[in-house]
Amino acid sequence: MAANPYSPHPGIGMVRNWIDTLKEKTGRSLEEWLRLIEEQGPADEKERRDWLKSEHGLGTNSAWWLAERSVGKGEEDGDPDLYLQSALGYVDAMFAGREALRPVYDALLELGLSLGPDVKACPAKTIVPFYRKHVFAQIKPATKTRIDLGFALRDTPATGRLIDTGGFAKKDRITHRIPVASLADIDGEVRSWLRKAYEMDV
């Protein structure tokens, strides 16, 4: 597997677009907003968020992102290279204290990426989703001894080891899961459901 098998999160493009159009939409560039916040804004991140909304009329998302940036957070959200660097750290942190599960994770990651050239793995801090057009599956360390492999299978009836998470009724993307505790658990049933979830995301 590649030294960094991950892909930039799809949300990065949205943040990048926000940064690129900020001056046009608000009259100030990102750097100009950060300078204003530093010089005139409150000290606390939450207070900065509220100040940007009440004093400068910014929407919730813009105020949230600017307040985060002003305290040194979220830079990776708009920078593909920084995100990829952070992704490796997210996964290492996810398995700190769960080292016995790391080979199981690595095998699931390789299996997911092998489904097709259009598959991307884009780690967050607690899960590693697989994307095709949307999230079709995710790897989530559930305990120190178990990973939950989640699937986007809509209203597919749960059979065998497949567990219905109630996600379809709640309009969640992930609707089913299979608990995976060892390499032996990554069997034909797991492979078949992962392939099915991949094929359903067209």
Image (cartoon, helix red, strand yellow):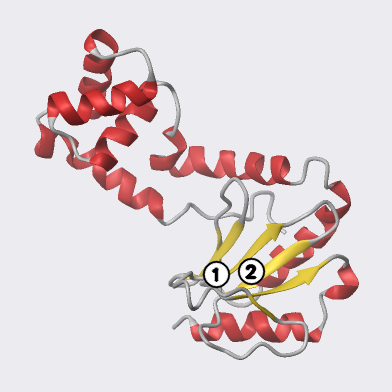
| Residue at screen point 49% across, 72% down | 132
Q: Is residue 122 left or right of residue 108?
A: left
The CA distance from mark 2 to mark 1 is 6 Å
Residue wearing tag 2: 113
Q: Are marks 2 and 1 in contact (CB under 8 Å)?
A: yes
At which x and y percent is residue 8? 48, 52
Quadrant (top left, top right, bottom left, bottom right) of the N terminus: bottom right
Amino acid residing under circle 1: Val
| Residue at screen point 31% across, 44% down | 16
| Residue at screen point 46% across, 37% down | 76
Q: Is residue 195 left or right of residue 170?
A: right
- Disc 1, SS: loop
- Disc 2, SS: helix
Q: Is residue 132 above or below residue 48?
A: below
| Residue at screen point 81% across, 60% down | 146
Q: Is residue 147 above or below residue 83?
A: below
Q: Is residue 10 left or right of residue 122?
A: left
Q: Is residue 87 left or right of residue 99?
A: left
* Circle 2 crowding by C-alpha within 10 Å: few under 14, some 14–19, many from 20: some
At which x and y percent is residue 175? 56, 75
Residue 119: image tag: 1
Front in this rendered view, residue 199 or 80: 199
Amino acid residing under circle 2: Leu
Front in this rendered view, residue 21 or 181: 181
Q: Is residue 139 above or below residue 46?
A: below
